[in-house]
Image: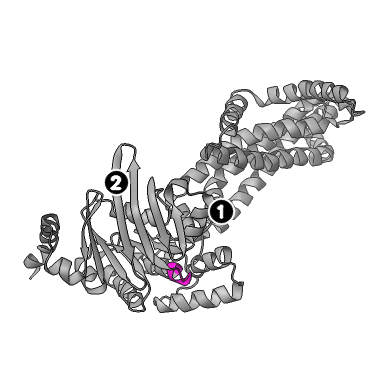
Amino acid sequence: MIKLSRISKSFGKNQVLKDITLSVEKGEVVVILGPSGSGKTTLLRCLNYLERPNDGTIAIGDYTVDCKHAGKKDIHQLRQKSAMVFQHYNLFKHKTALENVMEGLVIVQKLPKEEARKRSVEVLEKVGLGAKLDAYPSQLSGGQQQRVGIARALALNPEVILFDEPTSALDPELVGEVLDVIRKIANEGITMIVVTHEMSFAREVSNHVVFMDGGVIVEEGKPNELFGAPKEERTKQFLKRITSDWVYNI
Amino acid sequence: MQLDFSFIGTALLSLFKALPNTLLITAVSVLVGFLIGTAVALIRIYRVPVLHPIASGYVLFVRGTPMLMHLLLIYFGLPMLIDSIAGALGWGFRSTAIPLIGFVYISFSITAGAYMSEVVRAGITAVNRGQLEAAYSIGMTTPQALRRIVMPQALAVSLPNLSNNLIGMLHGSTLAFTVSVVEINAQAQIVAASNWKFLEAYIAAALLFWGMTILIERGTALLERRINNYNRGGVA
């Protein structure tokens, strides 16, 4: 369904991704973990060409792009296969919640306005914002903005939704409402790739966990395997440091 | 010598005859200048090969020389250029067929374009990069993203500076009198020359410009409030 093979990406002399190969099945919820600077966000952004990989191939659905020779058309096609939810929401500031969701349907997918509107309202209701259709992003809380962001991605009905640390910029109090929405759509069988630091969420929702460090995939597997019995030393170290918090919380 | 107040009123009335020319010069130069400015700003931001150094050179030269000089260069240079090209190609067209105000339009558009390109460029760079990324992420092309997402926000940011430019061009339009186009300033001179009441005529002209400027400022303020509607803030 999604196949990345031998993806490499450098920023100047700094090689951020080294020969990454990854397969994602339809309906899978993939969580990418790793310390900061491990390349997980870059990998996600390569998938919709917000970063341009130097080498490798990306295949989403029936569309394959050879990164070395990708032209404007390829990039445009590839981007229509996915949708992204950003860490800082990136809602279109000058558009209302409804217009934000409609924009892609009308402009990119060329749906008639009425149909786009109907679908957008449906999706916004699904994320619990049926009452905020005409609110501008500046009038919404962080959690509400992020839910509009999710609705915007979801409405496009993409092959995969990419989540780039969707809760990292939120007040702790608001994290829950966003995770609830993500959990809900994960259960609907939508393919998702999620970069996150929410360990318990990752463990509960995902069915495929990828641990990255230093630009390579160190280990991947089922959540139970990876969280319960990590094989690699680096993974063990990372999980220990991350999950030790809760010991003090009790 | 005494100020003749009643003549200020008389002069003001006759100045209205020249108002259309002033408004036309201002409107044409600002509208064309805005188009040039937007094109130049995009060329410079996207570093379009070949055009990029030309655009930078244009802005550098025009902003580095006075507006009056642009007018004189175009007024004396363009006819020579047109006539020599027309002569070489055997066209019957002569530069004398161009109305004088045409040279004003051309030269002031060039002037306005350079200044406005910097305003538009600043506006575009002020729009968060995330907006463009979000547009790409839902599958928009670059032209779609610019037209639908980036430019509306960039213009909202640039509005105060664009209105400054508009006022600048309105006041600058007075220079057109040097190439014998009768706009408000030239008309004031004509009125004054008939009975030597220069100060009164210029006071009338100043009042007229001031009035128009106030209108522009009011208009901008209204527009700004409307466009920036979405920035009202306040978590609902």
Residue B231 point in image, percent of width and height: 47, 58
Residue B172 point in image, percent of width and height: 69, 32
Is B55 magenta? The answer is no
Left or right of A3 in this view: B115: right
* Residue position for label 2: A16
Q: Quadrant of residue A228?
A: bottom left
The residue range painted magenta reads A152-158
Front position in the image: B113 or A215: A215
* Residue position for label 1: B152
Taking B56 as reference, is A153 above or below it? below
x 24%, y 65%: residue: A209
Whether residue B203 is visible to the viewer of this picture, yes or no, is no
x 47%, y 58%: residue: A78
**Residue at the right extreme, as displayed:** B92
Left or right of A179 in this view: A124: right
For the residue marked with disc 1, what is the amino acid?
Pro
For the residue marked with disc 2, what is the amino acid?
Val
Q: Quadrant of the C terminus of chain B?
A: bottom left
Whether residue B11 is visible to the viewer of this picture, yes or no, is yes
